[in-house]
Image (spheres, coloured by chain):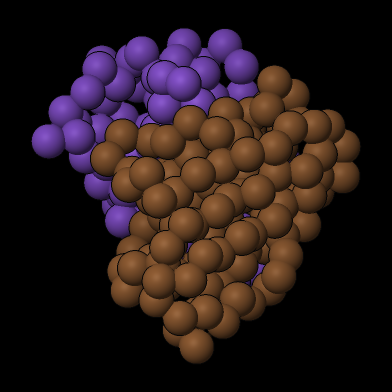
Chain colours: A purple, B brown
């Protein structure tokens, strides 16, 4: 079964750090670009970051540049998001998503909740 | 950054009716790299359409996408009870990838 499982979310104070992980199974992880997408409570979807299969190209939304770092370990079938200097407006459900061979994000995890609050 | 504007914000329809959702981009979307997703409460988004008009695996043929350049449309030919949800468009041709704000299709 093709699956993405996120972990690492939780409650954290403003200014602190958190590292999210996404474990992939059921497909050749190293062949595909991967992304993080977040959704604040009651709001729409926001693309956060993505990287190509070999990490050769990486992108971020402006609001997280310099604070978040995306990475992957193809040997471990895992995607990561290191989040530093967290702010209250980073509070959201964070999804990892796989880019489809022909485009779009065809596989999504169930998300991990990040709450930034004092 | 390409801004995607979806309309209407809410669509109130009855089962069996046709739904037409619009997505307008602030600039041309590269290679029609435009996708549509469906999201139900408490669930992750599901890919419906990619490259503007291709249905994803397992998506019923009542869902169709069209458009190019800056104007795109998702059509649901006859609404089934399970189709009432929020729909998002997304462009993935340029970075940052961006989503529209969503259209909620609700039961009238």
Q: Residue furthest left?
A: A1
Q: What residue is rendered at 74% in x and 32% in y?
A: B68
Q: What residue is rendered at 61% in x and 67% in y?
A: B103
Examine the image and state in which quarter residue B42 appears.
bottom left
Q: Is residue A59 above or below residue B76?
A: above
Q: Nearer the viewer, residue B77 or A49?
A: B77
Q: Nearer the viewer, residue A81 or B84?
A: B84
Examine the image and state in which quarter residue A60 appears.
top right
Q: What residue is rendered at 66% in x and 68% in y?
A: A89
Q: What residue is rendered at 77% in x and 57% in y?
A: B5
Q: Nearer the viewer, residue B93 or A118?
A: B93
In the rendered structure, the answer to whether residue A32 lies left or right of residue B74 reads: left
Q: How many marks?
A: 0
Q: Nearer the viewer, residue B60 or B36?
A: B60
Image quadrant where one finds the N terminus of chain A: top left
Give x and y (percent) for residue B25.
Answer: 80, 45
Examine the image and state in which quarter residue B52 appears.
top right
Is residue B31 something that shows in the picture? yes
Q: Residue furthest bottom?
A: B108
Give x and y (percent) for residue A2.
Answer: 19, 34
Is residue A49 something that shows in the picture? no
In the rendered structure, the answer to whether residue B5 lies left or right of residue B86 reads: right
Give x and y (percent) for residue B104.
Answer: 56, 73
Image quadrant where one finds the C terminus of chain A: bottom right
Q: Residue furthest right?
A: B27
Q: Is residue A12 above or below residue B59?
A: below
In the rendered structure, the answer to whether residue A111 lies left or right of residue A77 reads: right
Q: Is residue A111 above or below residue A101?
A: below
Give x and y (percent) for residue B4.
Answer: 76, 50
């Amino acid at each position: 079964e093709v699956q993405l499982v996120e972990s690492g979310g939780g409650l954290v104070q403003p200014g602190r750090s958190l590292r999210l992980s996404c474990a992939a199974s059921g497909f050749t992880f190293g062949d595909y670009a991967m992304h993080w997408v977040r959704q604040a409570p009651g709001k729409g979807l926001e693309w956060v970051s993505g990287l190509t299969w070999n990490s050769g190209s990486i992108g971020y939304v402006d609001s997280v540049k310099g604070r978040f770092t995306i990475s992957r370990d193809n040997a471990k079938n895992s995607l990561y998001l290191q989040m530093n200097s967290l702010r209250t407006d980073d509070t959201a459900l964070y999804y990892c998503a796989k880019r489809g061979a022909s485009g779009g994000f065809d596989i999504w995890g169930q998300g991990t909740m990040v709450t930034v609050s004092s | 950054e390409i801004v995607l504007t979806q309309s209407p914000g809410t669509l109130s329809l009855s089962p069996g009716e046709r739904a037409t959702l619009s997505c307008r981009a602030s600039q041309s979307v590269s290679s029609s790299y435009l996708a549509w997703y469906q999201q139900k409460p408490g669930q992750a988004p599901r890919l419906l359409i990619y490259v503007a008009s291709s249905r994803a695996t397992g998506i019923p043929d009542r869902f169709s996408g069209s458009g190019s350049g800056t104007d795109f449309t998702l059509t649901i030919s006859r609404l089934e009870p399970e189709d009432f949800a929020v729909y998002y468009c997304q462009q993935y041709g340029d970075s940052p990838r961006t989503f529209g704000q969503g259209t909620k299709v609700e039961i009238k």
